[in-house]
Image (cartoon, helix red, strand yellow):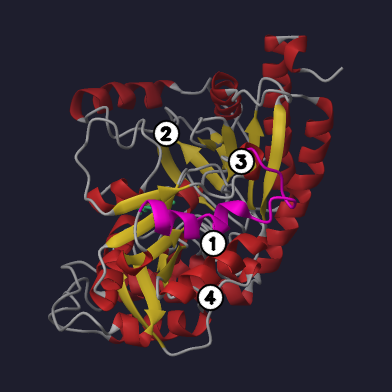
Amino acid sequence: MSTIQLRTPIPGPRSQALMRRRNAAIPQGAFHATPIFIAKAEGAVIEDVDGNHLIDFAGGIGCLNTGHRPPAVVDAIRRQLDRFLHTSFNVLPYESYVTLAERLNAITPGRFAKKTVLFNTGAEAVENAIKIARFYTKRPAVICFEDAFHGRTYMAMSLTSKTHPYKAGFEPFPGDVYRIPFAYCYRCSYSLQYPACEVHCARHLEDTFKRVVAAESVAAVIVEPILGEGGFVTPPAEFYSTLSQICRKHGILLIADEVQTGFARTGANFACERFGLQPDLITMAKSLGGGLPLAAVTGRAEIMDAPGVGQLGGTFAGNPAACEAALAVLDLMEKEDLNARANHLGEVFRKRAAEWQRRWELVGEVRGLGAMQALELVRSRATREPADTETKEVSQFCYEHGLVTITAGSYSNVIRLLMPIVITDAQMDEALGVLEAGLAAVVEKRGAAVQMA
Ligand SMILES: Cc1ncc(COP(=O)(O)O)c(C=O)c1O
């Protein structure tokens, strides 16, 4: 029996009525990728307010690697509800925060003494990683990348690349932020080809120190190991070995933003491991809390200890229910070997996607690691013109046929997979069938121009 069951056209009447209320009460800026209001969810399946069952390939934007409401996480939260809900760790500390810090210190890449501080959101973790890096190095500048996304607060927005809708109109941004091209080989900023390029993009950092900002002024380079909102751009491993080498040479800290890539998404606890990268600081959020808001910065102990007493924190940072949820998430990752499962899902997808790429010119590139996979859609293989409208159409086809997907990319032409890693093989197969039908429908609508000869 299929998982997807549609009783009404999508969106159904109840979703439509709620959307009317939403439009009257909530500003348009708080966007949503679908017009579907949810009633409940479990694993990789959601039920909307009209009784339709859909498969979730968005996972709350990558927050549900362990699925909707995993019983062990729900139980851990329930037990905490009967003890206390909030004290602020900055007033009355509790054990779960300490245990979580110990566990993150142990599982994050890098065999050196580490410490961890908790926050609520990814943007807050990024803000604090920059605070810590500047305080430790006593240097002002931060280097970030084209196509990066680090959040919506002011420093995080300054580090983010995409102008619309994230930055335009919100200027001025905090200063001393410098941006260099990422290893986006499909659209190389230097028009070079890997591997002949010898990762020129990473080596170019030395040039940046001569022409843009002095190395001795730079506190940190912040990078997503695989770009998230930027379209799941996956660099060659040498990119990171070169980048680390240059940072080390100049006493610059390397911050890995693992907010979207962490917690088994790429087939490893952290994407850094896939590249042999040992950053000085790591930012985490999203799937850490199993659906509750929780974020962390973990890093070398001497760096983390640089800010003095009272210089880091926040009223709700490290909420006790979220800490208990996170401990259950870490247990599940291990117990259910989610890394192996993520790699399996990646292989299933790649097999299907390779066929789509053979059949349709529209599918320009298939990329990713583990269960962090994406399709970059183009109008022509020769010009690589981004197929943004087509991407929107595929995504709309999907949700209208029972699969929730989200898009990404600076050119809004990437379909990304962020399904719960606990999705069953049958659900995965059914979901990929919908995605395939969506691609086929858009190719057919647009005619032979996007169909391979
Ligand atoms: C890599 C990365 N960093 C930071 C953030 C910001 O996280 P949040 O939305 O929890 O503030 C995101 C969110 O998508 C992200 O993908």
Describe the element under mark 3 as helix, strand or loop. Answer: loop
- Of the two numbered discs 1 and 2 on the same chain, state the one appearing first in sequence: 2
Residue identifier under label 4: 278
In the image, what residue occupies the spot 48% across and 55% down? 207
Q: Is mark 2 within 8 Å of ligand 1?
A: no
Residue placed most toward the observer, 427 or 441: 441
Residue identifier under label 3: 188
Describe the element under mark 1 as helix, strand or loop. Answer: loop
Please tell me whether residue 205 belongs to the stretch shown in magenta: yes
Pair 4/1: label in front: 4
Residue identifier under label 1: 66
Describe the element under mark 4 as helix, strand or loop. Answer: loop
Residues at marks 1 and 3, CA–CA distance in whole angstroms? 35 Å
Pair 2/3: label in front: 3
Residue 162 in picture, x, y percent from top left? 40, 37
Residue placed most toward the observer, 423 or 315: 315
Q: What's the magenta region? A: 191-212
Q: Is mark 4 within 8 Å of ligand 1?
A: no
- Of the two numbered discs 4 and 1 on the same chain, state the one appearing first in sequence: 1
Residue identifier under label 2: 49
Q: Is residue 424 above or below residue 308?
A: above
